[in-house]
Amino acid sequence: MEAAELLTRIEALEASLKMATTVNSEVFYWWCTALMVAIHAGFLAYEMGASRAKNALATGVKNLAAFAFLIPFFYFVGWYIYNAFPAGFVPGDASGAMPWSANMGPNLEDNASGIFWAAFTMFAATTASIMSGAVIERIRVSGFIILAIFLGSVVWVFGAAWGWHPSGWLTSTFGLHDIGAAGCVHMIAGFFTLGVLINLGPRIGRFNADGTVNEINGHNMPMSLIGLMLIVMGFFGFLGGCIIYTGDTWMTIYNTPTTFSAFAFNTLMAVAGGMIGCYLVTRDPFWMMSGALVGVISSAPGLDVYYPPLAFLISFAGGLVIPKLHNILLTKFKIDDAVGAVSVHGFGGIWGLLAVGIFAAGYPNVEGPAISLSGQFMSMLVFLVLGFVPGYVLSYILKMVGLLRSDPAAEKAGLDATEVPVKAYPESRIPAFGDGALTPAE
Amino acid sequence: MNSAPITTWEGATAYFTFADSPGVITICLVGAIAVCVYAIFSMVQHENASYKKLKSNGTPPSL
């Protein structure tokens, strides 16, 4: 074979290999995105089930609207923020992420932008949906959508740029390690939600005059459980999306090497640990499934490095503690978080970040110092403030202009009958209105 | 309407509709943003009208 012919064949092979790598990468994130849609199917089912029958569809409308609005707004501003602000509040060059850029549409020279934008859009929608369950049955859908857009398209994206980005300043300064986004997604969403709940207030009938708590049961616990299991399934897309495909190996979002095996071992062990922990302290199937989320979040920052039984124990510890923190918020602080989102995501995220500092200190980063407890702690504080302050301030403004809370009469009557033109259960009488025989909590 | 920015696939890069027309892209983008903002405004109006109807009827319209 002539040398020239050989060279041509080698070049063709190299081009083919490069294209195969590109295609594999696109296909990989495409299916991660598809799996993440299951998270939203899960949120939809579990929040509708956690609502009383009189509010089931209004809760569904809220979830569906959040999903629908997050997508365009993340296109308009979110993707740019992620790419422009890893250094803090001073923007870097991210012209390719502007919504009018040649990269932000069909482009034969760019196989990456759309598929990464899509995955991040699902991360954004997940972040906004975390707030969604906590505020059911009394928030105005319009107010919620404004909050969800701000949380999903702006607030968490700053957290992601700072701490879930190869050049994020939290990593380069503190050595933050948060592979599974316990900080930028879960903590920020959890504490944003806490800020909203303070201004929103509890559901009518949740507390008696003496401060004691009335139980408000959702109308369909089995649907909630299935929804939560769907979220767990969707997490495999979410966590898969946290891994970068380079063609010859897998990298974390911090450019450190990893394997899918690492994530497989630790994700499943974490799910199990969280479920068992919550079971032991509650015996409640709703908390068992929430425990699966607690488990994933507790171990999320170190899924790439933990010894699997250690991940199990870390998540088990989270499962033991988180339901108790939820009860403290409810009984001591009168925070009516309908699904435990603040505890599961906010406090679960804190535990996850600190656990890496305790159990994985010393692992090197590509940029910045090695993992340390102090670095994790400082980063945790940043996420806490970044989540809570905007949530509190924006919900306070919405409260002042009357856009935060539903009309009390509508809340008592049921939001479905007031705002939704169709019925969830047309052949059933929903015990919601006007016969005088019902307690406020019903 | 000729929206194609290319006349051949040979050497094509950004080939989405109006990729070579920044003015039209801006109109589309502003239009999309406007639709979203209007939808939120409409949501507020719907809620206000629902609350008003509930109070005037005394019962939810569907009961």
Image: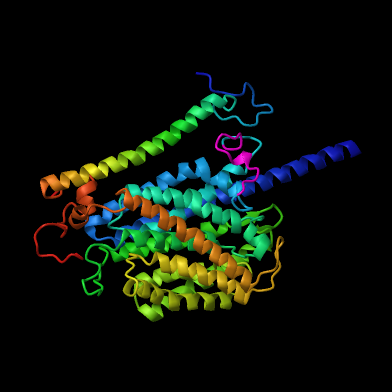
Task: Tell which of A263 and A409 is nearer to you.
Answer: A409
Quadrant of the drawing holding the N terminus of chain A: top right
x, y percent for residue A90:
62, 48
Residue drawn at x 38%, y 58% as measured from the top left: A196
x, y percent for residue A72:
46, 41
Give the vertical position of A289 relative to A135 (above or below).
below
Q: Is residue A97 magenta?
A: yes
Residue drawn at x 34%, y 58% as measured from the top left: A45
Q: Quadrant of residue A388?
A: bottom left
Q: Quadrant of residue A344?
A: bottom left
Give the vertical position of A198 relative to A93 (above or below).
below
Quadrant of the drawing holding the C terminus of chain A: bottom left
Q: Is residue A35 magenta?
A: no
Task: Tell which of A150 and A260 is nearer to you.
Answer: A150
Give the vertical position of A341 relative to A54 (above or below).
below
x, y percent for residue A175:
66, 65
Q: Kindly tell me whether residue A2 is visible in this rendering.
A: no
Q: Which residues are magenta?
A: A90-104
